[in-house]
Amino acid sequence: MAVDTNPGTAPNTSAGLHPNQGSVAVELGLDVTKFRSAVEAVEAIESALGKSAEEECARWFAISALRYLRKEKWAAPNDSGLDDERQNSLARDCLAVEGFSSSLRTVTKDARSKFRLVNFASSKKIERGVLATGTKAYKIAAHVIVEAGLVEQKEKKASNKTKSEPKTEPKTEPKKKSQRPELKEIEKTVVGRRAKRRGYSEDEIVKVVGVSEVPSDKNQALPMSKEEFADLDAALSKSDTEIIQQSWGDQQNEDRWSRILGLLAGVGFFVFIALLFL
């Protein structure tokens, strides 16, 4: 049921009864002169509407939200330009959303807010016919109205514009190539590797290749080319060979002297034995 109420043609009503509510009662064949308050009028209207009372209450609420979003001052639902079927369809769409029905019952708990056009603000003022925009019922109604294309939403336009704009990746400066390691650090690495592998101390290898001649200033960077690195590796290999040969020669000399001393000790022993028995 859709009842169009206009304050100019609304019947005389009791104190506290809104003209919209009075017109709904008259449309239903109720005698408004018997109602002493809005509560009595709303109870009679709901009793007459039966199961359709919730949809009728939702229709008035949705049209009120539409009026607020359009910033209009309609006195009756039909002033919105929507016919009865479109108004009822809008109410059913709101009721189809989970949570709207329960929120609507809470929002319109006061009889002065039912079956009439209300206004909206950040906080409710029931005595002035103002409900809050922060309720779930209002948010759902506003969403349904926007999705139905009944009002334009600036925020939605702005978000669509943002989505349509191509995303620009932030410019990143190319990574600078890391500076080549210092000569001293390379030499220390090679020396340490060879010293651990062959059992020589680092000081011996450093002394052979002349690393001690490299400046000790940590802030002084000396670039090393591939040729220089190859020369360094060859020098280390050569130094290793020389050290091994020298060690081997020293070992041979020690073995030779050991055999000579052993032979002399044996000859001396036999001479000593011989002298004892003579």
Image: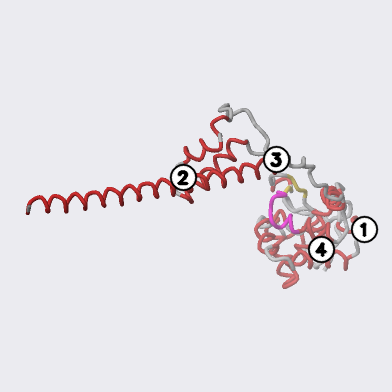
**Position in image of residue 116 (x %, y %):** 78, 56
Q: CA distance from mark 2 to mark 1?
A: 111 Å
User: Which mark is nearer the camera, 3 or 4?
Assistant: 3
Tell me whether the residue at label 2 lies in contact with that at label 1, contact meaning CB atoms closer than 8 angstroms.
Answer: no
Q: Tell me which residue sits at (53%, 38%) in the image.
A: 208
Residue at the disc numbered 3: 225
| Front residue of this view, candidates 240 and 10 | 240
Label number found at residue 148 = none
| Front residue of this view, candidates 174 and 123 | 174
**Position in image of residue 191 (x %, y %):** 53, 43
Amino acid type at image mark 4? Val
First in sequence, mark 1 or 3: give its number: 1
Residue at the disc numbered 4: 26
Amino acid type at image mark 2? Gln
Q: Tell me which residue sits at (81%, 63%) in the image.
A: 26
Q: Tell me which residue sits at (40%, 50%) in the image.
A: 252
User: Which mark is nearer the camera, 2 or 3?
Assistant: 2
Under tag 1, what secondary structure? Answer: loop
Residue at the disc numbered 1: 81
Judged from this view, the residue extending furthest toward the left is 277
First in sequence, mark 4 or 2: give its number: 4
Give the extent of the magenta segment.
132-140
| Circle 1 Cα neighbour tier, 10 Å, few/some/many (<14 / 14–19 / ≥20) | few
**Position in image of residue 111 (x %, y %):** 69, 56
| Circle 2 Cα neighbour tier, 10 Å, few/some/many (<14 / 14–19 / ≥20) | few
Residue at the disc numbered 2: 246
Q: How many marks?
A: 4
| Front residue of this view, candidates 197 and 50 | 197
